[in-house]
Image (cartoon, rainbow, N blue to C red):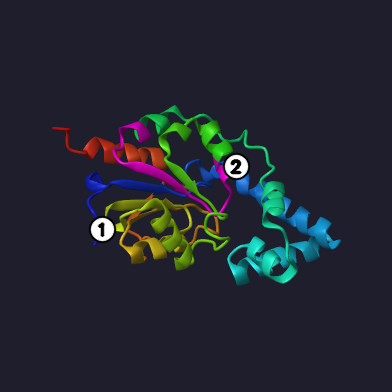
Amino acid sequence: MKTALHETRCWVFDLDNTLYPASCNLFVQVDRRIQQYIMSKFDAGPAEARRIQKSFFHEYGTTLNGLMLNHGVEPAEYLSYVHDIDVSPVALSPPLDRVLERLPGRKLVYTNGSVPHAERVMERLGVARHFAGVFDIVAAGYVPKPQPKAFDAFVKLYDVDPSSAVMVEDIARNLAPAHALGMTTVWIRSDHHWSGGSATDPHIHHVIDDLVDWLTGVADAMPPLP
């Protein structure tokens, strides 16, 4: 059963298209860098590189997983290359900073990206000070969301009690393991095809359109401190 929001002790946020709006389109840059990496690594043309990229993504959860398992690609090299992007579309967000300050409990980032990428984004937003840690694809042993094994590793590493945790994500399917563990789940819906999901999905407790607006409403509704 989901916990009452005011009883939350741990707030878990996805990074990309969650802490910042999907309209920033950072993943378009990452997607292009992945294609370029494959073109360079395998002397492939654009169409063949795209085919490899997407087939590995669908079969293994991330393109990186497919490249590691099938071609022995060094993950650190890959992650450094694909996250070498321009993060300037992400703007400073004083409203997000203020509302995170108001929320009691730990704040963690759980991303299929890398820690350096997360740190760059959080610095752009001006919210890094609020987060106790970043659980990235490296910490997960390169096992991506939504595989339950990765969630188990996250919960164990940060000693998260799922019954008092909230997870916020822009990809609906990534919330299924969080729900199974007992977390309260929040889906930020969008028009992007990868967002998926429906307001009636049983593993989604809250459907929102704007993170700051929703968190502000949660903070406003919290009972006053004694």
In the picture shown, does residue 215 fall above or below 95?
below
Q: Which residue is mark 1?
A: 2
Q: Is residue 44 left or right of residue 179?
A: right
Q: At which x and y percent is residue 104? A: 29, 38
| Disc sitting over residue 116 in the figure | 2
Identify the element where label 1 is drawn. Answer: loop
Question: For this rendering, which residue is in front, 31 or 155?
Answer: 155
* Element marked by disc 2: helix
- For the N terminus, the image quarter is bottom left
The image quadrant that residue 52 belongs to is: bottom right
Residue 200 in view (yes/no): no
Q: Is residue 33 above or below residue 124?
A: below
Q: Looking at the rendering, which quadrant does residue 48 occupy?
A: bottom right
**Looking at this view, is 45 or 103 the one in front?**
103
| Closer to the camera in the image, 221 or 199 | 221
N-terminal of the pair, mark 1 or mark 2, is 1
